[in-house]
Image: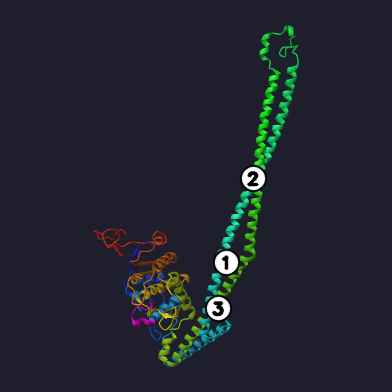
């Protein structure tokens, strides 16, 4: 049952029908961008409409399926292989098989075989041209050895770069501390200079005060020596003076004595000021010496960085960049040789098989550019999960599966098969989302990590680093999709507390959430989770 946009309920059919749009399958296909798509179902080129069941095993991976040996593309039914290959091609390229015309005419079959041979020969010729453009030996063994030498050179240059960085860091710290010391000394010198200016003004003020007090003292001394014929208050002559007026008169000699005492006090202050200024002069002189020393240290460290270390750093970085470019060029040449070898093997098969068998091959070849990009996505995923011993991931068109470090995925134990199955399925989702291609946008995986608790014989259990990296990558790399992982392993604390992931603990009891599907309550309705 579906609630439509207009608010009315619509009943959807259970079975998929090509011409019936009112079914659960068609509704899900429309949401996935796969509505009205067609896939090839047999060697004759007969086609049928796309059903959501065709991608269900690529969206929901059970606990038993995740450790299967065959390709994650296959559901396990051998009779469905042709259809499942067509589904994979449609997801990678966005092109379905609606243009395929069923054929049984021998002449048409022969023409298709010849066309296939022509395509393969052109692909081989194009690979030869691209190999020649690389200007590298067209020998896989030589290229592999050369790639190993390049890797060693990169490691050596990286070690040199790290050593130079450590030396540069020490000199940069010396320069930084010298610069801070220089600025601190300059600031203190400025403060002392300002204080000396103010003390000079104070010294001048003291001298002015002494001159003024000296004048007052001298005048008072002279006044004290003079006879008082007239009252200084009322001006009356001595015979008319009133004794009561004397209380308002200040003795000039006492005034002179007071001025001389104040002059002596100021002279003491001038002496103290002189001591202070002398101390400040000595401090300023010491700071000038310190400034010269820290400046010399700063200049020496800067010179060492500019003349020796920085050129060495730049040269090491340049060398590493050159080696990395050479490495990519060599890897490209190796990939082209591997492609050419695959094309040649396929051409041999095409020429050796019957017309009927050629018909099967006609629709099974994928453009290598699609599988190359997909294999890179799987390699990026496994690298993000820190898979031990990871080298290069390629696509095996024979098994329709990935080769990990030159080894088939099925040849590993169930621990590696489980994690690489998850990488395959999640990389397909990431590939479709990034290239705006059809996909359900949902992946549910059951128990991709729990198998590591009991590894196969000869296969070591993966470290906690891989498990933690697995959860962190899902939390950070699939914000535009819906990923559900059912697992016994507890994600790391930063993932549990992150807003990028929703971690739910299944208790198996009546407390909390019992399991993935909530238990019904007494009223027959679903639980609140």
User: Which range is magenta?
Assistant: 71-82
Decide if residue 271 is in sight here.
yes
Question: Gap between marks 1 and 2, in whole Å?
Answer: 40 Å
Q: Which residue is mark 1?
A: 164
Magenta span has 80?
yes
In the rendered structure, find residue 283 and report the number of the disc placed on it.
Answer: 2
- In percent of width and height, residue 415 lies at 36, 74
Magenta span has 283?
no
Residue at (64% x, 45% y) in the render: 283
- In percent of width and height, residue 213 lies at 71, 26
Question: Gap between marks 1 and 3, in whole Å?
Answer: 28 Å
* Viewer-side label of 1, 3: 1
Within 10 angstroms of label 3, few (less than 14), some, or many (20 or more) residues? some
- In percent of width and height, residue 270 lies at 68, 34
Q: Splitting the image into 4 quarters, where does residue 456 fall?
A: bottom left
The N terminus lies in quadrant = bottom left
Q: Which residue is mark 3?
A: 329
* Viewer-side label of 3, 2: 2
Label 3–label 2 contact, CB within 8 A? no
Near-viewer residue (303 or 506): 303
Near-viewer residue (254 or 295): 254
């Amino acid at each position: 049952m579906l609630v439509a946009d207009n608010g009315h309920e619509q009943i959807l059919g259970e079975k998929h029908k090509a011409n019936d749009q009112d079914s659960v399958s068609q509704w899900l296909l429309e949401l996935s961008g796969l509505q009205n798509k067609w896939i090839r179902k047999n060697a004759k080129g007969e086609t049928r409409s796309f059903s959501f069941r065709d991608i269900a095993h690529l969206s929901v991976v059970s606990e038993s399926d995740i450790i299967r040996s065959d390709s994650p593309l296959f559901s396990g039914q051998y009779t469905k292989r042709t259809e499942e290959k067509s589904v994979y091609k449609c997801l990678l390229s966005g092109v379905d098989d609606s243009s395929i015309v069923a054929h049984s005419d021998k002449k048409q079959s022969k023409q298709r075989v010849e066309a296939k041979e022509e395509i393969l020969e052109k692909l081989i010729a194009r690979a030869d041209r691209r190999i020649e453009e690389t200007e590298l030996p067209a020998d896989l063994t030589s290229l592999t050895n050369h790639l190993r030498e390049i890797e060693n050179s990169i490691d050596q240059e990286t070690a040199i770069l790290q050593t130079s960085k450590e030396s540069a860091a020490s000199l940069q710290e010396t320069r930084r501390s010298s610069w801070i010391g220089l600025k601190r000394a300059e600031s203190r010198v400025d403060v002392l200079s300002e204080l000396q200016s103010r003390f000079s003004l104070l010294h001048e003020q003291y001298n002015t005060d002494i001159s003024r007090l000296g004048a007052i003292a001298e005048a008072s001394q002279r006044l004290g020596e003079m006879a008082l014929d007239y009252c200084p208050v009322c001006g009356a002559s001595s015979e008319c003076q009133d004794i009561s007026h004397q209380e308002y008169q200040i003795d000039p000699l006492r005034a002179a004595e007071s001025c001389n005492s104040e002059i002596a006090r100021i002279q003491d202050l001038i002496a103290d000021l002189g001591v202070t200024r002398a101390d400040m002069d000595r401090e300023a002189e010491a700071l000038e010496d310190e400034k010269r020393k820290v400046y010399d240290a700063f200049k020496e460290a800067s010179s060492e960085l500019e003349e020796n270390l920085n050129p060495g750093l730049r040269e090491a970085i340049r060398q590493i960049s050159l080696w990395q470019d050479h490495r990519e060029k060599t890897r490209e040449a190796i990939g082209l040789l591997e492609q050419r070898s695959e094309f040649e093997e396929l051409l041999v098969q095409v020429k050796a098989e019957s017309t009927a068998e050629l018909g099967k091959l006609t629709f099974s070849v994928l453009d290598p550019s699609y599988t190359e990009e997909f294999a890179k996505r799987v390699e990026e995923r496994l690298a993000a999960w820190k898979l031990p011993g990871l080298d290069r991931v390629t696509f095996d068109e024979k098994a329709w599966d990935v080769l990990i470090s030159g080894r088939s995925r099925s040849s590993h134990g169930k621990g590696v098969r489980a994690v690489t199955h998850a990488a395959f399925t999640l990389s397909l989702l990431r590939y479709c989302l990034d290239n705006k291609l059809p996909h359900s946008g949902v992946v549910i995986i059951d128990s991709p990590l729990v198998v590591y608790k009991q590894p196969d014989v000869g296969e070591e259990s993966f470290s906690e680093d891989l498990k933690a990296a697995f959860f962190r990558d899902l939390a950070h790399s699939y914000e535009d999709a819906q990923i559900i992982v059912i697992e016994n392993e507890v994600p790391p604390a930063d993932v549990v507390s992150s807003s990028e992931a929703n971690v739910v603990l299944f208790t198996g009891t009546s407390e909390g959430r019992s399991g993935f599907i909530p238990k019904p309550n007494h009223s027959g309705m679903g639980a609140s989770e």
